[in-house]
Image (cartoon, rainbow, N blue to C red):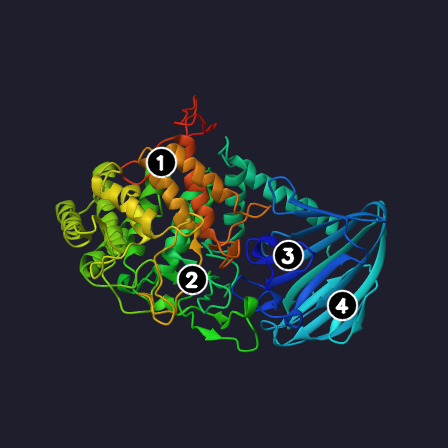
Amino acid sequence: MPRRLEDYALLGDTQTAALVHRDGSVDWLCLPRFDSPAVFAALLGTNENGRWELGTVQTVVNHQRRYRGETMVLDTEITTPTGSVRVTDFMVPRGGGHPKLIRIVVGLYGRVSMFTDIRFRFNYGEVAPWVRRVDGALVAVSGPDRLVLQTPAVLQGEGLSTVGRFDVSAGDRVPFVLTWSGSHAPRPASVDHEAALVRTERFWSAWSERLTPSGLYRDAVIRSLLTLKALTYEPTGGIVAAPTTSLPARVGGGRNWDYRYTWLRDASLSLGALQHSGQVAEGAAWCSWLLRAAYGDPDKVQIMYGVGGERLLPESQLGWLDGFGGSAPVRVGNAAAGQAQLDVYGEVIMALEEARDGGYPPHADAWAFERALLSVVERRWRQPDRGIWEIRGDPRHFVHSKLMAWVAADRMVRATERHRLPAPVDAWRALRDSIRRDILERGYDPVRNSFAQSYESNDIDASLLQIPLVGFLPAHDPRVQATISAIEEDLLDDDGLVLRYRTAPTGSEAVDGLAAGEGAFLPCSFWLVDAYVVAGRVSAARRLFERLLALGNDLGLFAEEYDSVRGCQIGNFPQAFTHVAVVHSALLLSEGAPRTPTGRWLAPRTARTRATGDGHPWKSTKRL
């Protein structure tokens, strides 16, 4: 059986990230960027594909871990029959420096025997580097990569591993500092691990202090926002969907994709969550990233880019990795970058309009860019596309895609009306009305009495939950109510979680062109929470929301999906899309009100709070 994703913690320096198992093993780390080749890749293979173990020789009697306050510094306390230690793991916010992973073992009481086993591997576990000792440090080099490990612990080579044993008594501090640099560059200078720890704590604490949410679900919201910040590539403002690749939608299945890129849709939603929680700077950085990445022919705007704005993301397979739990193939790159997905235009325009409505004027070029995007929508909205789920089957007329085309036109009309921006507003109103009529005539199935996944079928899709959330129809409309009921009837798994859609029976292919089988998609389950709230079913919404929160791990981290059969998280981890959904649902439940008809979240109160149907207020000291 593969390791459980719930057992991993996230470390990040706002340029890349590491996953640390609760047993002290770093099983995933890409350097120097999120999308760089991994130097520890055991998550997708075996120990021989690279990992860094750090643990106790003696039997563990008790084990506790937590993030230090509202930071990304991880403390793990381990008790053995002879004593107790704390292992502090963190990555130093980089700025313009080298990426650093630091681990500090601190003796708490008694005496504990520790061990470490480091298997440096480059190029996703394919290459074992040449390791030598230089000036008291271990230096591992292969091709363009160099790793330098500084530690007072005595280490030695053993096969293709670097191993060591050392004892820690009360008050002892044994640091390990791992630094990456290009092999052609001067070797990085030594690092003061204590100063680095202070700097890292201050960085995250200062960032989280600017967050405005409080109330019943504050802890979950803050941890989700910190996770989104950790998934942001600081030099450009791009936000990756996840720091991992090829964690499967079903163990043993082939729905394994590389998520270490910036999807316009996911990043737009992340922008909204951060901005409405007081982090305006992230909104500014993302808007600038968007314009830089998408400059050029608006017809060639992609659904995703590299974190630096790269367009070419060729997809290939790594045959030497067995995959998570044997779930091959392992993919790097993502061919979906070349897909046409109409909904992205609506998501981007809605995000830019929410920024403008919130008092943050987007970049001076934003309005011209939005107009260019809407011109593409005007030309393409009648065409089939690959949809929000990036199907690899034949394009279809997905209702969600048409819905977001309507959103694009609607938000542009409203922006013109509110901000008196120059525009052919009458033509845009006509476009909005045409898309609306088309959806109501062709996207609603009167026989089944609900909206359908696409014009070509009467299947149900969880993305239809967005209909009342974006203001297309009010939640009390009978067609919306019937669609929610259809989703409850057809798309809930045995644990009451929401599937994206029904994949095909075994031996055939679904609309997505892939073999059947995946877990419940967690963002969709949170969308059902939102739909319940706007429909006035607040108690049902709260029950479902709190069940969903319980599916997160002990550190408040969520993957993309949940496997109700195996009882564990599945899919790329941690997933920005899911953490955005946590924030949005918590805000809805706490505020007791949906977005306005323009798609904006209602701002938290300043001088007062307002309770929902279940009496839990959302408090804030600042109007967003």
Q: Quadrant of the C terminus?
A: top left
Q: Are marks 2 and 1 in contact (CB under 8 Å)?
A: no
Which residue type carries mark 3?
Answer: Val
In terms of secondary structure, where does tag 2 sit?
loop
Q: CA distance from mark 4 to mark 3?
A: 22 Å
Image coords of residue 610 (percent x, y): 40, 24
Q: CA distance from mark 4 to mark 1?
A: 56 Å
In terms of secondary structure, where does tag 4 sit?
strand
User: For the residues carrying marks 1 and 3, which lies nearer the camera in this image?
Assistant: 1
Number of marks drawn: 4
Q: Which residue is mark 3?
A: 20
In depth, the one of 232 and 382 nearer the eye is 382
In terms of secondary structure, where does tag 3 sit?
strand
Which residue type carries mark 2?
Answer: Gly
Image coords of residue 311 (percent x, y): 39, 67
In terms of secondary structure, where does tag 1 sit?
helix
User: For the residues carrying marks 2 and 3, which lies nearer the camera in this image?
Assistant: 3
Q: Which residue is mark 1?
A: 533
User: For the residues carrying marks 4 and 3, which lies nearer the camera in this image?
Assistant: 3
Looking at the rendered structure, which numbered label has been put on residue 238? Answer: none
Mark sitting earlier along the chain (2/3)? 3
Q: Residue at x 55, y 45 (%)?
A: 556
Looking at the rendered structure, which numbered label has been put on residue 309? Answer: 2
Image coords of residue 217 (percent x, y): 50, 35
Q: CA distance from mark 1 to mark 3?
A: 36 Å
Residue 231 relative to residue 409: left or right: right
Q: Which residue is mark 4?
A: 138
